[in-house]
Amino acid sequence: MKLLVINGPNLNLLGVREPSVYGTDTYEDLCNFLKKCVLNKDVELEIYQSNHEGAIIDKIHEAYYKKTNGIIINPGAYTHTSIAIMDAIKSVMIPTLEVHLSDITKREEFRKVSYIGLACEKRIMGKGFLGYQEAIEYFIK
């Protein structure tokens, strides 16, 4: 099974960015956690992060040609703004789960809208790194 984890803008600043919301673990800690989640499982995991909308769209398109089985995406702020990323997910028809470290429904009003979620099978929020693990397990099952 091939899984792609896409992390959007500012997630590279985990541990620095708003630790009261996102915690003190770093992006490197997240990547190491994800790799441990697939140890001894028949999963090829690719982890990708970009602050650029077009690069994220290109990665989603690439996943189609690589015959990726599932996408786990934390689109960051693009959650609330990017119809283009939503359309890319719909276009490739790869099962996709939306993951957020924080519970976006309990934050600012504008964060409650998710365009990306309209193209996803499931949304996991407010579970920190464990949300990613839950998404990986969803695809394994």
Image: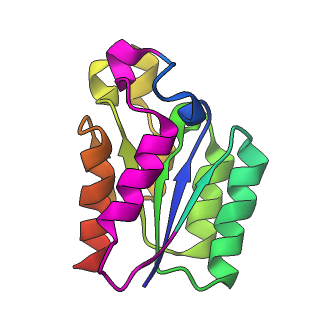
In the image shown, does 107 or 2 lie closer to the viewer?
2
**Residue at 51% from the left image edge and 19% from the top image edge:** 16
Number of numbered discs on residues: 0
Where does the image place residue 6, in percent across and percent down from the top left? 55, 54
Compared with residue 139, is residue 83 higher up or lower down, i.e. above or below? above
Quarter holding residue 59: bottom right
Q: Mark yes or no: residue 80 visible.
A: no
| Residue 65 left/right relative to 128 | right
In the image shown, does 42 or 114 lie closer to the viewer?
42
**Residue at 24% from the left image edge and 58% from the top image edge:** 134
What span is colored magenta in the figure? 18-45
Q: Does the magenta stretch include residue 37?
A: yes
**Residue at 59% from the left image edge and 86% from the top image edge:** 67
**Residue at 42% from the left image edge and 53% from the top image edge:** 32
Quarter holding residue 136: bottom left
| Residue 60 left/right relative to 23 | right
